[in-house]
Amino acid sequence: MPPNITLMPLPPRCPELNPVENVWQFMRDNWLSNRIFKSYDDIVDHCCFAWNRLVDQPWRIMSIGMRQWAHGY
């Protein structure tokens, strides 16, 4: 490892430090919450719809994944 890089170990079981957890939380908050699903296929359809909406918004994914403490802003 280069001498100018310092590893910052993350504590175990700490989902708020994992950007992917924030992506899932955003999808739940905006497209998947407060629903009653009729069947498993209905759940899959809603999840695919939510995922495709998010994929169409790459700027949103970047903003969700950014951490000010990690980037020094």
Image: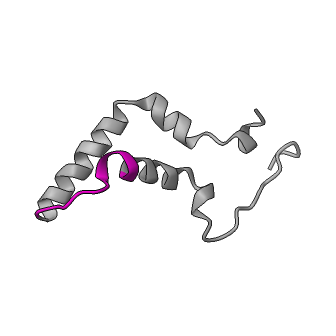
In the figure, 33 relative to 53: above or below?
below
Q: Residue furthest bottom?
A: 13
Q: Position of residue 58 (x, y in %)?
A: 43, 30
Q: Which residue corresponds to the image point at 46% horizontal and 48% vertical from the top-left?
A: 23
Q: Position of residue 36 (x, y in %)?
A: 19, 61
Q: Which residue corresponds to the image point at 28% horizontal and 57% vertical from the top-left?
A: 34
Q: Residue furthest right?
A: 3
- The answer to whether residue 59 is left or right of residue 32 is right
In the figure, 44 relative to 39: above or below?
above
Q: Position of residue 20 (x, y in %)?
A: 50, 52
Tell me the quarter of the picture where residue 70 sits. top right
Q: Nearer the viewer, residue 5 or 70?
A: 70
| Quadrant showing the C terminus | top right
In the figure, 29 relative to 66: above or below?
below
State the count of labels.
Answer: 0
Q: Which residue corresponds to the image point at 74% horizontal and 44% vertical from the top-left?
A: 69
**47 in the magenta segment:** no
**31 in the magenta segment:** yes
Tell me the quarter of the picture where residue 11 sits. bottom right
Q: Position of residue 6 (x, y in %)?
A: 83, 50
Tell me the quarter of the picture where residue 49 sits. top left
Q: Residue furthest front?
A: 34
- The answer to whether residue 17 is left or right of residue 69 is left
Q: Which residues are magenta?
A: 28-38
Q: Which residue corresponds to the image point at 23% horizontal and 57% vertical from the top-left?
A: 35
The type of colouring in the image is one colour
